[in-house]
Every structure is written in C-alpha cells, then in structure tokens.
Image (cartoon, grey):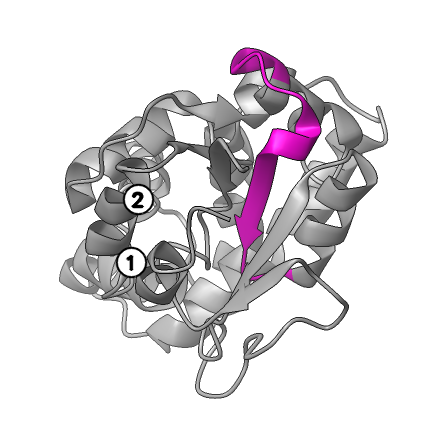
Amino acid sequence: MIKALFFDVFGTLVDWRASVARESAATLAPRGHDLDWLAFATAWRGQYQPAMEKVRSSARDYVKLDVLHRENLVAILPAFGVRDLPEATIDELARRAWRKLDAWPDVVEGLRRLREKVLIAPVSNGNISLMADLARHNGIGWDAILGAEIAHDYKPNARVYDAACAAFDLPPGECAMVAAHTGDLLAAATRGLKTIHIARPDENGPGRGEARPAAPVDIAARDLLELSGMLPL
C-alpha cells in the first residue's frame, strides 16, 4: 500500500515554459524589450541543470533555487540583447517568474482526490518559499513541503528522496515518486521508492516532452485524474 506520494513540480505539475514566458513579457516588455518570450523561457530553464550540478558535485555549497534562478537569469540576458537592466528589475523578474507558474488543467482536482487517499508533498528542487507561493497561486493544499531545501541537495542525488521518506516516518517502499521525467523516477527507484510516470508530452513545447516513460516504472498514467482512480494500490 502506498501511503505517500511525492511530486516533482516543474513540468510535472506546472507549465513552466508558457508561464515564465508570460511573466517575463509582463516585466520586460513595458521596459521596451521585445523578445521571443518562449525562447527566453527555454534558455532560462536551460541553465537549471548545470547550475544545480555544481551543488550536487560539491563544487559549491547548497544555495536555494531562488539564488540559482537569479544567477541563471543574469547569465542569459546578454544573449537576448538585454543589458543594463536595473538590479531591482532583475530581482523582480527572478522572483516573480517562477512563483506564477500555472498548473496543468488536471492538477488541482487530481491532487485533491489523491490527498483523500494518501499523504502528498512536493519533492522538488524548488525551495520552500517558492513551493508555498506556487501552491497559493494554484490553490494546492499539501500535507508538507519537502525536497531540496530539506535535504540541502538537489535531485537526483539520493539524500533528497531519503529525506522525504524520513520526514513522513515511512519506509521507501510505502512512498512513490510522481514525475514526468524518467530520470527522476529511476533515481527514486534506487532508493526503494515506487515510481509513477505522468505524461506531459508538451512540457518543452508541442510534442517535446515525455508522453510515456523511457524505462519501466510501476505505474504510468495520462494525468493525475487518471492516477487518482488507480489508488489505493
């Protein structure tokens, strides 16, 4: 019996690409910038894994994802011809863009149904305040907020998954990682968690996401509404 579901957030629960593009335009367009906003969002997200890898490899101490998001924004601005942006504007955009991500249509109701059966929590690389703001933006009710800030590390390093199970005082076999990214699930499986894949075929643009898992998982579902009908296991 699964007693807790741990959720990846960026891409699995929220549409980061369209949302970051929208919020970037809302901040920068009034200042005279006319960019390919979807390309801008994709480039910003493209800095995500390399920045976290420095922490995962111990090349730098753990810092919250908010810090990395700001550093990554500064890194990509020149490539889009955005220079001499006031520090206050950079701060505003770095904070705002990732806190206004809209949930996929199935998510709010799907999570509500799942929470009637099991404990639910994000196990995201996002920090706690970021996850709290995203939950309030979308009307999501969690039982706890777990993930990178609890473990002081980033997925897919093992201690992120271990810390989540420990926080709920559950053995890994009674927990499941839910994600639209096979790599996240495979890493969780090495720690003994069950694995649930959610299809997000358009996460990175039309047809540029995982419509199905790239490796065997315990469950594959179209969305959270379908998953809610599969529990209890």
Residue 154 visible in this rendered orientation of the protein: no
Q: Quadrant of the N terminus?
A: top right
Direction from residue 142 to residue 120 in the image, left or right: right
Q: What stretch of residues is rendered in magenta?
A: 166-181
Name the residue rendered at 61%, 22% in the picture: 165
**What residue is pinned by disc 2?**
93
Q: Does residue 167 show up magenta in the picture?
A: yes
Q: Is residue 97 magenta?
A: no
- In terms of secondary structure, where does tag 2 sit? helix
At which x and y percent is residue 201?
49, 79
Q: Is residue 141 above or below residue 96?
A: above
- Residue under the image location 60 percent in, 31 percent down: 174
Which residue is outermost to the bottom? 207
Q: Write the residue at 39% across / 74% down.
A: 38
Could you say which quadrant of the image residue 189 lies in?
top right
Mark 1 or mark 2: name the one nearer the start of the chain.
Answer: 1
* Residue carrying label 1: 24
Circle 1: residue type: Ser
Q: Position of residue 218 (x, y in %)?
A: 66, 58
Q: Eyeballing the image, is 68 above or below 21?
A: above
Give the structural element (helix, strand or loop) at label 1: helix
Report, in whole angstroms, how far the alpha carbon at label 1 lies from the one at label 2: 7 Å
